[in-house]
Amino acid sequence: MKKKIKQERLKAVQRFFNGEEPESICDSLGRSRSWLYKWVTRYTPDDSLWFEDQSRQPLSSPDRTPAEIEKIVELVRLSLYNKDLFCGNQAIQWEMNDMEVQPIPSLSTIGRILRRRELTHRRTGRYTPKGKKYPELPSREPNQTQQVDMVGPCYLTGPIRFYSLHAVDTAINRCGIEPIPSRAAQSVLDAVYAVWLRMGIPENLQVDNEMAFFGSPVHPRGMGPLIRLCLRYGVNLWFIPPSEPWWNGVVEKFNDHFQQKFLAKITMSSMTQLRQESLTFEHRHNSTYRYSKIKGKTPLKALACTEKKLVFPSKGDVPRHPLDKPEEGCYHLVRFIRSDCRLNIFSEMFSVPPETQYEYVVATVDVKEQKLKLFLDTIQVEEYKYQLR
């Protein structure tokens, strides 16, 4: 077919230069005048392939990533790879952000650049993590550590918008579910307190950097409602590193379970019905689901087999926002220090010692001393004045 079209172009141009009328040529071939003049214009005696199709790709693309940015992506990827560090799209983007490169390409753009430059090969052999091990919290006994997360917004038929706060005991996988209408401070306090009334108060509570949990980036030292609640009850509150949800993996996996086994299967039309069904699902999970890590027991059976005495808050002491400013206690933030040696505490930046580069550190806020203490492993490496507001 292509060969026939090319022959047609050759003969049409030859007939034109032999003096035949354009109307006659076009009528016989069923072509337009613009088509004929296009190939007459394209005809070059010195080019034997003038009748071939030409690429339609534009000569320039204003949206194409600048060549210097592509080169930086390549160099950063090679540098991370050679240092045996994570070198995926996200790691490259973080590194470029630390280098204050502008513009920062998106994750998908970085992926396309790596594929064009054939830099998608993986390491051979098993990856060996470098640097300090992540400071994981204990989970040998019930309520040593609870992981908390929030799912939403979700929608009931109506539509009614809601969020669902989930807590999971990392030792026995016992869960608590509490639906709330919004992420407002009082709603979060009500949900966490309601879960504690059923599950007990944990020694450690681990959350992500959801603004509803820490307060506001405008006032990073203001101690949000959850921080104040935990300090009030002597709970060690831990914030995992930003953009690393896998460290809250137990509750994240439960979130998927909740979506598939509850939201996708039960139709609800009111908050009252939602609360009833949530409690039913919570009880069914805790009393019937079996986990290999607790030797095939259900969470409630595993709890009954321990001698751990749970501590519960008073039913009549429901916290009201705003809570009083605590006078003592500590809360903690786990952070990964990258090449710029900067520590991010809810968008407030601190310079840290060079030995913490590419390490996980624990930043502990001591409320009584009004200090921010930085730990690498169990060794304190820096201390900052930290006036809380």
Image (cartoon, rainbow, N blue to C red):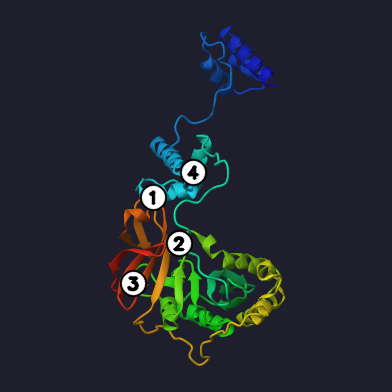
Q: Is residue 129 left or right of residue 269?
A: left
How far is the residue under mark 1 from the one under mark 2? 17 Å
Outermost residue, bottom direction? 316
Mark in the foreground, 1 or 4: 1
Is disc 2 placed on a helix, strand or loop? loop
**Residue topped by disc 4:** 109
Residue closer to the observer: 236 or 166: 236
Asked if disc 1 and disc 2 are in contact, CB closer than 8 Å, the reply is: no
Residue tagged 2 = 241
- Image quadrant where residue 13 sits: top right
Label 4 with label 3: CB-CB less than 8 Å: no
**Are there few (<14), some (14-19), or many (20+) residues within 10 Å of tag 1?**
some
Report the amino acid beneath label 2. Pro
Q: Which residue is mark 1?
A: 97
Kind of element beneath mark 3: loop
Q: Is 195 above or below relative to 8?
A: below
The answer to which quarter of the image holds residue 166 is bottom right
Residue at x 61% of width, y 10% of height: 15
Q: Position of residue 289 (x, y in %)?
A: 70, 72
Front tag of 4 and 3: 3
Q: CA distance from mark 4 to mark 3?
A: 36 Å
Q: Amino acid at mark 3?
A: Arg
Of callouts 3 and 2, the N-terminal one: 3
Q: CA gap, disc 3 to disc 2?
A: 18 Å
